[in-house]
Image (cartoon, rainbow, N blue to C red):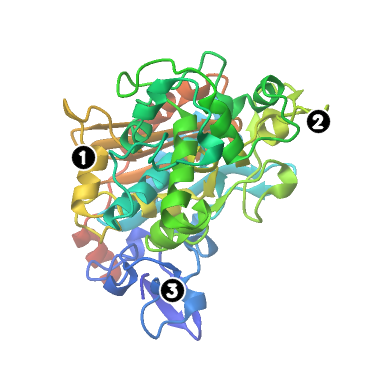
């Protein structure tokens, strides 16, 4: 099996807390070697019950698993942080040495419904979704279906479609897959981010319906670039929407299915999905999203005259796709991260070369791919939406963690800097048990 557990009948009970694990036990993040060939049909070991091996960690995790004396001071730091910044709820997961050593929810998952946060709750991942998209692109490269230096638009290019032939700025013909990944394609945000100004895009183009992925890309091609491709870093959600289309074009599958079968399932993540826009669209174990000082805004749909909170109807979250629409838990997301870090503690779903390419920063490759930053073994990915602020990090010592809130702060994307400082303070209070500690506790 791919988890530490004791089988009672047909049900597997996962022992999550590090204090319950034996040093000789197989880390539950390590799938059996037969699980890494990719595809939905290959994630179960031979003879293993498919219903069991596909069951998400979120079905088993509880706060009680991480209620240990060593974490009391860390919990206090986090709880004080939530109180200070008026955060309704949050969730944290930590992986060390290939083991999930901590997974805990804080505060409310849905206050009006009376649901407290647990580690099994899932959240909109915002731009943490980009790392999943980048991993999917690298899988396609490993399969020989894509090259990072291929051109994206124009005759003979990857997306040489009639609907993408109206190109206003000839410099767009120079855009490559790599430039999209590293945010150097040169897209302009002079008129705002098109992914978050759907209403304005519809008005400018006289659209009768909310633009889907193809319509949004076609619209972008009718605009001028803000800079020459391959130049300076310009963060672009649009670039990752285009990468979503490239994944579909090269794989012959829809984006969500390709990512699930070739990235997330092989990494052992079974409760990740693409988001809906409204509260009634949420998944059963998805949190409710909150804003501080709620202001109602126009619908993202030009032809809808209603007013909505930004969290539910003010933005077309579902339309972000590979740029920001994934939903998942920190426990599964760190499991995904630990499967693309190349440190050898668990089998990776990407090759060593792909991991190097994604994290390399040098004169010829100044920007990481999918990550926001990578410096001396510390790789960071952040994400912000109305109702969400998230940070995920792989530290130089191999520790992988993710912290996410279901409440947006007035500081917007800058709030992740406060999360980073809080996590440093929180980690400074805890001594993670060694393998010797585990052995002695088990003997007791």
Q: Which residue is mark 3?
A: 41
Mark 3 secondary-structure assignment: helix
At a point 76% along the width and 32% down the height, the residue shown is 208
Give the quadrant of residue 142.
bottom left
Q: From the image, which quarter does the C terminus lie in?
A: bottom left
Q: Secondary structure at mark 2?
A: loop
Q: Earlier in the sequence, mark 1 or mark 3?
A: 3
- Could you tell me if residue 272 is visible in this image? no
24 sits left or right of 187 in the view: left
User: Is label 2 in contact with label 1 (beta carbons under 8 Å)?
Assistant: no
**How far is mark 1 from mark 3, CA to CA?**
35 Å
Q: Which mark is residue 304?
A: 2
Q: CA distance from mark 2 to mark 1?
A: 49 Å
Q: CA distance from mark 3 to mark 2?
A: 42 Å
Badge 2: few (under 14), some or many (20 or more) residues near its Cα, within 10 Å? few
Rendered image quadrant of residue 38:
bottom left
Callout 1: SS: loop
* Residue 321 image offset from top left, x and y in percent: 54, 42
In percent of width and height, residue 120 lies at 54, 55
Q: Residue at x 52, y 35 (%)?
A: 164
Mark found first going from the N terminus, 3 or 2:
3
Provide the residue designation for mark 1.
Answer: 396
Q: Which is closer to the viewer, label 2 or label 1? A: 2
């Amino acid at each position: 099996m791919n988890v530490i557990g004791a089988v009672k009948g047909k049900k597997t009970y996962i022992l999550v807390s590090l204090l319950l694990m034996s040093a000789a036990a197989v880390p539950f993040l390590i799938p059996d070697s037969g699980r890494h060939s990719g595809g939905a049909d290959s994630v179960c070991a031979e003879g293993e019950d498919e219903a069991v091996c596909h069951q998400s960690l979120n079905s088993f995790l509880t706060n009680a698993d991480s209620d240990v004396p060593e974490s009391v001071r860390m919990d206090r730091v986090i709880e004080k942080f939530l109180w200070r910044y008026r955060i309704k709820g949050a969730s944290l997961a930590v992986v060390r040495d290939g083991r999930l050593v901590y997974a805990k929810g804080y505060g409310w998952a849905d206050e009006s419904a009376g649901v407290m946060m647990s580690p099994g709750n899932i959240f909109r991942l915002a731009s943490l979704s980009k790392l999943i998209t980048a991993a999917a692109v690298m899988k396609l490269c490993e399969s020989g279906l894509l090259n990072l230096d291929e051109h994206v638009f124009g005759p003979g290019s990857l997306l040489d479609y009639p609907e993408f032939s109206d190109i206003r700025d000839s410099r767009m013909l120079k855009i490559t897959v790599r430039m999209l990944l590293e945010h150097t394609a040169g897209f302009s945000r002079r008129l705002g981010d098109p992914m978050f100004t759907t209403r304005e895009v519809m008005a400018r183009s006289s659209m009768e319906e909310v633009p889907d992925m193809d319509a949004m890309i076609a619209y972008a091609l009718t605009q001028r670039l803000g800079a020459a491709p391959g130049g300076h870093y310009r963060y672009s959600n649009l670039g990752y929407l285009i990468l979503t289309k490239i994944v579909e074009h090269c794989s012959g599958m829809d984006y969500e299915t390709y990512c699930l079968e070739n990235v997330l399932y092989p990494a052992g993540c079974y409760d990740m999905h693409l988001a809906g826009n409204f509260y009634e669209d949420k998944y059963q174990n998805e949190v409710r999203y909150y804003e501080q000082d709620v202001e109602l805004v126009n619908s993202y749909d030009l032809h809808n005259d209603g007013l909505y909170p930004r969290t539910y109807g003010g933005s077309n979250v579902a339309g972000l796709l590979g740029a920001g629409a994934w939903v998942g838990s920190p426990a599964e997301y760190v499991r995904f991260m630990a499967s693309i870090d190349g440190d050898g503690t668990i089998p990776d779903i990407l090759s060593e070369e792909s991991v190097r390419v994604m994290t390399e920063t040098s004169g010829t490759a100044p920007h990481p791919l999918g990550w926001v930053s990578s410096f001396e073994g510390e790789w960071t990915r952040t994400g912000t939406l109305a109702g969400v602020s998230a940070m995920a990090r792989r530290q130089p010592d191999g520790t992988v963690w993710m912290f996410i809130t279901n409440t947006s702060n007035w500081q917007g994307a800058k709030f992740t800097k406060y999360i980073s400082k809080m996590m440093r303070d929180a980690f400074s209070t805890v001594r993670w048990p060694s393998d010797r500690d585990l052995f002695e506790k088990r003997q007791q």
